[in-house]
Image (cartoon, grey):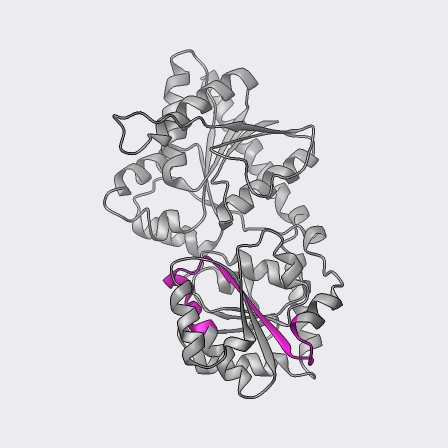
């Protein structure tokens, strides 16, 4: 099948999932065309079935903001026509679903039809999409899609709750390439960070308020009162300066390191003992899955799609949002020398259920279903 994939080419979860999906599809023999404004961060190797088309965004004095949606729609029309695509799969509703609808209408003028699948990832529904400035367009674009998927049952329910969606939504969870995240022996790295055998705690995010990085630091401070430990914070964002200040106030600066944005996050996770994700909202929890794939148990909140991923008391523990004291106590329980090996093993076993080899067929089956329905509609 010839598939077009539209996504954000960034470190965010939707872009990562879309890129990894395209790579997996290409390995299975599908022709995959990425269409976005720059090369996706994980699209870093050559495969004869992978193609990249850059959206050319022109700037003119008339435009205060370059009209990306129009440039994307025009590029989609060209790629669909000249590469003879069978299906267009757009990730993140804003503005990809509306650009896909526009492209589809343009193509109809030349009797060219193409089915469009929109995958909802989270903040395109739970945050940005609910903004009154975007809601009518988001609702229309979702309903105009031939197929809709969501990365968790919780996100599916949120979509039906906040938008007047008239079509069914297929739940296909996020996935992991276990080969990439297979635990790597990097004892020298662990020794350099934890020279005295400290336990290593890791958190990765975009440092927005919804990620509650402040809670991560408070949990770590509590852990450190009982055992020797180090904290690695991976990522960057608007809360970073506040978190740096909080670390100084709690007098834990010597044991906290800010690593910034990292592409090869698995190299850090491979030496971690515990991953902390106390988010206010997670539509799925991809970062937690990546940690579990590296045999790292997780302390998390029990919000959004996390209960669909985590097994409380097995892969780690979940607590109510903001319950720092309970999360701290559970972290110490997991980190004990007696319990840690068991939790590491159970985290990996759960992650294996989300291996790309298990999830990819769900996408392929859905692609075939939507293409078949579209072809029947055209015949009629």
Residue 48 among magenta residues: no
Q: Is residue 250 left or right of residue 367?
A: left
Q: Find residue 246 and report its horizontal and vertical position in percent.
A: 41, 75
Residue at the limit of the structure toward the bottom, as seen here: 226
Answer whether residue 321 is visible to the viewer in this image: no
Q: Is residue 174 left or right of residue 237?
A: right
Q: Is residue 364 above or below residue 290?
A: above
Classify residue 167 by image quadrant: top left
Quarter placement of the N terminus: top right
Front residue of 299/53: it is 53
Residues shaded magenta: 193-216
Q: Find residue 288 and report its horizontal and vertical position in percent.
A: 56, 62
Q: Is residue 188 left or right of residue 225?
A: right
Instruction: Tell me the residue at 36%/49% (across/down).
Output: 125
Q: Is residue 270 above or below residue 223?
A: above
Q: Find residue 313 and report its horizontal and vertical position in percent.
A: 58, 76
> For the image shown, how many numbered marks are present on the structure?
0
Q: Is residue 294 left or right of residue 247?
A: right
Residue 200 among magenta residues: yes
Quarter placement of the C terminus: top left
Front residue of 182/104: it is 182
Instruction: Tell me the residue at 69%/35% (across/down).
Output: 28
Q: Is residue 224 above or below residue 6?
A: below
Residue at the limit of the structure toward the left, as seen here: 132
Front residue of 249/69: it is 249
Answer whether residue 45 is visible to the viewer in this image: yes
Q: Find residue 120 and report its horizontal and vertical position in percent.
A: 44, 45
Instruction: Tell me the residue at 38%/59% (across/down).
Output: 238
Q: Is residue 122 above or below residue 221?
A: above
């Amino acid at each position: 099948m010839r598939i077009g994939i539209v996504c954000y080419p960034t470190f965010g979860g939707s872009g990562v999932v879309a890129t990894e999906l395209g790579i997996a599809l290409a390995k299975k023999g599908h022709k995959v065309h990425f269409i976005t404004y720059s090369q996706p961060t994980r699209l870093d190797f050559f495969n004869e079935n992978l193609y990249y088309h850059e959206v050319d965004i022109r700037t003119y004095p008339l435009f205060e903001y370059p009209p990306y949606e129009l440039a994307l729609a025009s590029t989609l029309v060209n790629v669909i026509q000249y590469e003879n695509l069978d299906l267009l799969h757009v990730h993140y509703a804003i503005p990809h679903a509306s650009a896909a609808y526009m492209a589809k209408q343009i193509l109809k003028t030349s009797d060219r039809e193409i089915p469009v699948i929109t995958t909802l990832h989270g903040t395109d529904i739970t945050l940005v999409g609910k903004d009154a400035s975007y809601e009518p367009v988001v609702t229309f674009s979702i309903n105009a899609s031939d197929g809709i998927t969501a990365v968790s049952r919780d996100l599916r329910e949120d979509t039906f709750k906040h938008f007047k969606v008239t079509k069914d939504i297929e739940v296909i969870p996020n996935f992991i390439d276990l080969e990439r995240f297979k635990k790597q022996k990097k004892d020298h790295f662990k020794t350099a960070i934890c020279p005295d055998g400290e336990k290593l705690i890791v958190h990765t995010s975009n440092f927005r308020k919804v990620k509650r990085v402040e809670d991560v630091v408070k949990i770590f401070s509590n852990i450190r009162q009982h055992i020797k430990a180090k904290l690695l914070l991976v990522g960057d964002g608007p809360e970073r300066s506040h978190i740096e200040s909080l670390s100084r106030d709690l007098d834990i600066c010597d044991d906290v390191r800010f690593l910034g944005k990292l592409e090869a996050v698995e190299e850090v996770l491979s030496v971690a003992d515990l991953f902390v994700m106390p988010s206010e909202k997670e539509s799925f929890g991809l970062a937690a899955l990546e940690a579990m794939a590296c045999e790292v148990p997780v302390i998390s909140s029990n919000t959004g799609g996390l209960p669909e991923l985590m097994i409380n008391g097995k892969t780690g523990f979940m607590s109510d949002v903001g319950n720092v004291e309970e999360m701290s106590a559970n972290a110490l329980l997991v980190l004990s020398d007696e319990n840690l090996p068991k939790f590491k093993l159970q985290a990996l076993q759960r992650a294996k259920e989300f291996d790309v080899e298990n999830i990819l067929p769900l996408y392929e089956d859905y692609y075939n279903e939507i293409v078949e329905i579209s072809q029947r509609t055209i015949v009629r």
